[in-house]
Structure formats: structure tokens, C-alpha cells
Image (cartoon, helix red, strand yellow):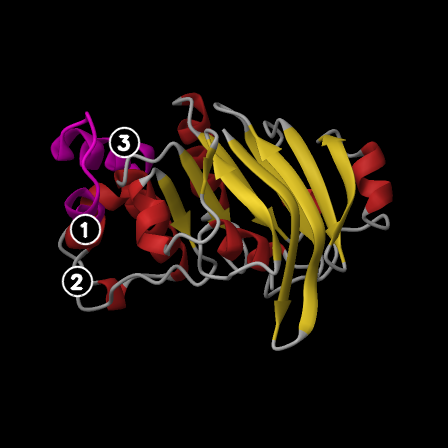
Amino acid sequence: MLAVNDLFVAIEGSPILRGVSLAVSAGELVCLVGRNGAGKSTTLRTIMGIRAPLSGTVALEGRLLTGLRPHAIARLGVGYAPEESDVFGALSVADNILLPTWTRTTDRAAAARIGLAYRVFPRLEHLRERGGQQLSGGERKMVSIARALALDPKLLLLDEPTEGLSPAVVPSIIEGIASIRRLGRAVLIAESNVDHVPEFADRLYVLERGEIIYAGAADGGRALAAFGGSGGDDRRGR
């Protein structure tokens, strides 16, 4: 599904990613874990075409994404929910979720795609007419993920989906992600705390100073050792 090979990225002359390679297969949930400045968000942004790599490639189902603009990558079936959520405050919840159905046509009808987004996050059903600026942080995160799902993506990129949220809201986000995985979509999550990695994750990559230092089972043992024995302190996921 997704193949990232030997990715090098610099920002304002400073190297951020050094030879990053990772893969996500169809139906897999894979987590990319790392501390502040490790390069998690940069990895997702480069996959999405927001950042241009110095070298290396990104491919989806064998098709090269490197060099494409973000809107073209989205039309190929990559959904992206950034850490900041980026919900349109002037639009209602319903309109936020509707937008991707205008930008990408698939075999699924728009109504079916929107209905699925509400089934994954049923709480949003009662907030349809509420404006984006009136939502809590957890509600904005749900809208951001639901909007990406309404694109009908083959691959979903989620940047810090539970970071900074109330503990009361986190279970709803995690259950929504579990529902997406059960749909058979490929999911790549960037997470700052290894303790927040969903227990149903298939595999784990640990990113340290722009390099992958662990790739394997998400069972906590070797992964935790690779991460220095703690969840880290990455609050910005850059």
C-alpha cells in the first residue's frame, strides 16, 4: 500500500529526516512514535506532499507520490488529519465533513461516505449544525478525522490524534480509529507517547533524531527499550 524509501528532508537547511523508510499494508494500523523534534509530523507532511524531500521516494500502491501536490495526493486516496485539526470555523460540522466528497469521486456515493463518518463518530451526529468555532478540542479532532474519512481514502494519516485531549474524550477517538481499521483501511498514526499507541496496532516504528531506530511488533518490550524506556515528551510532533 504505502512505501516510503530512504527519505531525506531538510527544513531551512537543517536536516530533519535521515533515510527514513517505512511501509503500511492494506488493512494495517501502523504507529510512528518519537519525541519532540524527531520528525514524525515532517514524515506525514512529506507523504502528503506538503514538504518536498531532498531525496527518497513515497509511493502508494506502486504509484510514485513524490513531487505531486497535496490535492493530487488526496485525489489518489490519501486522507490526512493534522495535529492542529484545521477545522473550518466558519462552516458547520456537516459542511466540514461534506467538503471532501466534492474534491474526490469514488465508487461510493457521497451520502454513503458521509454516513460512514457519522457512524465512526456518532457524537458528531448531534453536532451537525454546530459551527467549527464552537467545538471543543476533542470534537474538532473527531471532525478532522471524520472529514478525512469522508474522502474515502485508501490510506489515512493521523497526526497526534489524542494529544492534548481530555481523558474523557480519548476513548471515543480510539474507538473511532479501531472502527476505521476494521473497515480495512490502511492507517498511519504519528504519536509522541508510546503508552498511547493503540493496543490493536499491527506494527510500530520508533523515530529518533530523524532516523528509524526500531521497526517491528507493537508489543511494548523492544519498542519501549528503543524509545529510552518512556513515552517521551513530544507535544508538538514536529
* Residues packed near mark 1 inside 10 Å, few (<14), some (14 to 19) or many (20 plus): some
Residue occupying the point 29% across, 43% down: 75
* Residues packed near mark 2 inside 10 Å, few (<14), some (14 to 19) or many (20 plus): some
Q: Position of residue 97 (x, y in %)?
A: 22, 48
**Callout 2: SS:** loop
Q: Is residue 113 magenta?
A: yes
Amino acid of disc 1: Leu
Decide if residue 210 is on the left or right side of residue 137.
right
Kindly identify which residue carries mark 3. 119
Task: Choose mark 3 or mark 1, whichever is in front.
Answer: 1
Residue occupying the point 49% across, 46% down: 170
Q: Is residue 106 magenta?
A: yes
Amino acid of disc 2: Leu
Q: Position of residue 196 (x, y in %)?
A: 63, 44
Q: Decide if residue 201 is in sight here.
A: yes
* Residues packed near mark 3 inside 10 Å, few (<14), some (14 to 19) or many (20 plus): some
Between discs 2 and 3, the one toward the N terminus: 2
Decide if residue 77 is on the left or right side of residue 206.
left
Q: Position of residue 94 (x, y in %)?
A: 16, 50
Q: CA distance from mark 3 to mark 1?
A: 18 Å
Judging depth in this view, the residue of 118 and 150 nearest the camera is 150
Residue occupying the point 19% across, 63% down: 131
Give, as a single range, the part of the protein colored magenta. Answer: 98-122
Between discs 3 and 1, the one toward the N terminus: 1
Q: CA distance from mark 1 to mark 2?
A: 10 Å
Determine which of the numbered discs, if any, sits on residue 99 in the image.
1
Determine which of the numbered discs, if any, sits on residue 91 in the image.
2
